[in-house]
Amino acid sequence: MAESRERWQSRTRFILAAVGCSVGLGNVWRFPYIAYTSGGGAFMIPYLIALLTAGIPLLMLEFAIGQKSQESGPGAMRSLHPKMEWVGWWGVGISFMIVIYYAVIMAWAWDYLFYSFGLSWGTDAETFYNTSFLQVSDGPSAMGGLRLPIFAGLILTWATIYLILAKGLKSVGNIVLWSVPLPILLLTILVIRGVTLPGAIDGLSYYLTPDFSKLLDPKVWLAAYGQVFFSVGIGWGIMVAYASYRPKNTDITNNAFITALIDGGISFFSGFAVFSIVGYLAMLQGIGVPDAVTSGFGLAFVAYPTAISAMPVLRELIGVIFFLMLLTLGIDSAFAMVEAVIAAAHDRWKKRKVMLTRIICVAGFLFGLPFCFNGGIHWLDIVDHWVSTWGLAVVGLLECIVVGWMFPTDLLRDYMNEVSDFRIGRWWNWCLKWITPGVLVVMTIQAFINEFTSVYGGYPLWSVILGGWLVVALLIVTSIILQNKSPISQREISRKVFNIHKKSA
């Protein structure tokens, strides 16, 4: 007997799950750095405009098609156009590819949580990270041996994901009640501790002082749209799947605004935790704040541990709080990506979700093993660059094309206005038809030019072809293969999903 579609127990759980998906590690180690390099406080102007013209409209779109079709990503795209199901599969494939190496980064965080109890990284966190912990090899061709601490952390990560998802949506709803508020509480503690450190004000000054001249630089605006797109959680198939677990007659627009604004607020707030520490580090090392600024892995596993070791009191406690925050931030995004894959597989093949969860978690763990070797960091960097650059943005662009140009856009907007707390006007149509795809086209062209101007990261060409272009090509080919070939017309879809019988539909 087929399983009936699961439902969120409350609107609160749905919003918390959506926020947990959108708020991840990138909010802490990506947004503050981009804001700093893009005009400081002035960056909030293009960021908010990007949020209103791209992030929120696309989030509304994904909530709407998931909720109305009661299908995950592939089925929802098929409900818009019979030949565009593969776009949904592409988004699902990207989610699976990203969670494979995302789980490895979480494995690092598990290890560093353990190391925090004795501050095992000592006084030279950079050497510990590269030489003792990762034991980084000379390049992609030198895989070296398996790093057992990372292997153990990966087991722990996937076991946690499985235990959360195996019991279904009810378990997810219960988990997000604490896993979303907890990292915000921990982040608040880090901010309070950070701003009390000497030199913190200098760091915060660099973060917040507006440079309005930067607003004349097109790259700053592209950076704002890029940050919004990669942070809000659109293009992964996750928000579509989550919305499909809501009844058809429930709010969409207000939920989208709440989710996106909370994500942006946490991103901005995290900058206080980051730049207070950057200012403290600059003071300790006798260098300028710009020379101490870093992002990504360097911030989480080098800069912060360095600052923690130099703190006069509560060093171990702050270390535990920081890496526990990373883990709680990461776990919601991780199991959300896996849920997007499970939902798509369940909708397509109608197999029991607990069995699909087991298969997908084991597969994710096995595919993640190569990243646990000495040379794994090189491949993680390559795959992350290509999947992020040529995955999410292109999926978002295709979603805009399908809804804005291949489907009666007003049907979707009318549906949202019918069920939502407040109505939206034609600005939504214009965003999906012109503004968002226009920006995404420019971003894609710019990225394409960059790829052929120089070899990414200085890696050997063969490695970026294998770990970059080949991975993206496999995702696209697999998505096309999974496309449902059964004949169905656009009019039939509109009648079935939107109850429209007019010829124009």
Image: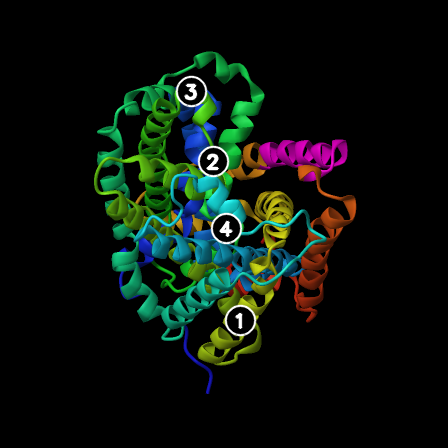
User: In terms of depth relative to the viewer, which is nearer, 200 or 407?
Assistant: 200
Residue at position x 71%, y 42% from top?
459
User: In terms of depth relative to the viewer, which is nearer, 485 or 112?
Assistant: 112
Q: CA distance from mark 3 to mark 2?
A: 17 Å
Report the amino acid beneath label 1.
Ile
Task: Name the residue tied to disc 4.
Answer: 132
Q: Given this view, does label 3 or label 1 mark the residue nearer the observer?
A: 3
Q: Is residue 278 left or right of residue 409?
A: left
Magenta segment boundaries in residue numbering: 437-456
Task: Name the residue tied to disc 1.
Answer: 360
Q: Position of residue 498 (x, y in %)?
A: 49, 59
Q: Are marks 4 and 2 in contact (CB under 8 Å)?
A: no
Q: Position of residue 142 (x, y in %)?
A: 69, 54
Residue at position x 47%, y 30% from top?
34
Q: Residues within 10 Å of mark 4 (few under 14, many from 20)?
A: few
User: Compared to 259, does 339 lie above or below?
Assistant: below
Q: Is residue 71 left or right of residue 405?
A: left
Q: Position of residue 445 (x, y in %)?
A: 69, 34
Local secondary structure at mark 4: helix
Q: Given this view, does label 3 or label 2 mark the residue nearer the observer?
A: 3
User: Compared to 438, does 75 lie above or below?
Assistant: below
Colouring of the image = rainbow
Can residue 77 be spotted in the picture?
no
Where residue 295 is drawn, which disc sits there?
2
Residue at position x 47%, y 57% from top?
238
User: In terms of depth relative to the viewer, which is nearer, 478 or 61?
Assistant: 478
Q: Is residue 24 left or right of residue 389?
A: left
Task: Name the residue tied to disc 3.
Answer: 287
Q: CA distance from mark 4 to mark 3?
A: 26 Å
Q: CA distance from mark 4 to mark 1?
A: 32 Å
Q: Residues within 10 Å of mark 1 (few under 14, many from 20)?
A: some
Residue at position x 49%, y 36% from top?
227
